[in-house]
Image: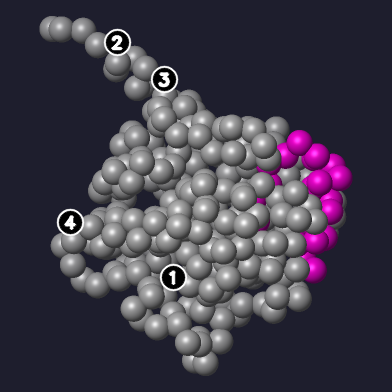
Amino acid sequence: MALDYTININGRLSDFKQVKVMGIVNVTEDSFYAGSRVNMEEDIESRVSQMLQEGADIIDIGACSSRPDADFVSAAVEGERLRRALKTITAKFPDAVVSVDTFRADIAKMAVEEYGVAIINDISAGLFDPQMFSTVAHLGVPYILMHGCTPDMAPGAKNSNVTESTSPKTDNTSPEEFMEQMARFFAEKVQYLRDLGQKDIIIDPGFGFGKTIEQNYQLLANIQWLNMLNLPILVGVSRKSMIYRLLNTTPDEALNGTTAVHTICLIKEACHILRVHDVKAAREAIAITGKTRSALCQGFDL
């Protein structure tokens, strides 16, 4: 897969001729997959070291769980957790490309300015903090724009001034209408970001966020439609409920299903970053699909 698109990561241009792997590190107490949770300094160091050795291109640090029904922690708690993790990572792995998973503009600013974080990954697409778009544009770092969060998911939603009109739509529609709605959502958000001066944007279709299981598989079946936006696509399906509920298992047992979904996205050439808990398995899926595609391109006539 080759996409003629580059992003600026820490002053260096990075392309997507090869699919990148983003390893998930959660410094939380309640993320849905227990295997991703690390809090002690030695555990953080061990997990990041293993991911880098297995081929992770990016380390994504999250300090506020976004699982369904999770209680959003305060900005103070999120910042304290992140500072502890980032201090360890920047000291032990100074060359690592680090992303921070946050919906708070002040947290994004702290992470970039104090610790040199390279990418901001916002599940809310600016919905939860109206300062996020202008903040990332000012910081000049790549921004991951995700589809799927709705006003009722926001912290303090009952008292929020966020309205339904500002959120993505995921009504019961046909697959074509569903994908068209998502494409419009991204097009409008991307234009707003561009108007603010944001240069590097990665889109995340938001598997598992604000979607039914049926809609998640509509998205999977038609994800190649998003290539029309000519932006890198991040796929984050690792061990999610769309997999383990369909298979009647648990997050702990969902690696095989995760690899199956990754393979589908890779074959459809609609995936430029895989956000994963299991780096080695993702790297293997990328290698096998890449080798198969290379063999297919050689072709022959019967």
Figure colour scheme: one colour
Label drawn at residue 298: 2
Q: Residues within 10 Å of mark 4 (few under 14, many from 20)?
A: few
Q: Reading the chain from its start, which is encountered first: label 4 or label 1?
A: 1
The residue sitting at 43% across, 61% down in the picture is 192
The residue sitting at 73% across, 44% down in the picture is 48
Label 4 sits on residue: 176
Judging from the image, what secondary structure is the residue with disc 4 in?
A: helix
Label 3 sits on residue: 291
* Residue 208 lies in quadrant: bottom left
What is the spatial separation of the Cα atoms under label 2 and label 4, in whole angstroms?
33 Å
Judging from the image, what secondary structure is the residue with disc 3 in?
A: helix
At label 2, which amino acid type do we have? Gln
Label 1 sits on residue: 149
Viewer-nearest of discs 2 and 4: 4
The residue sitting at 86% across, 45% down in the picture is 91
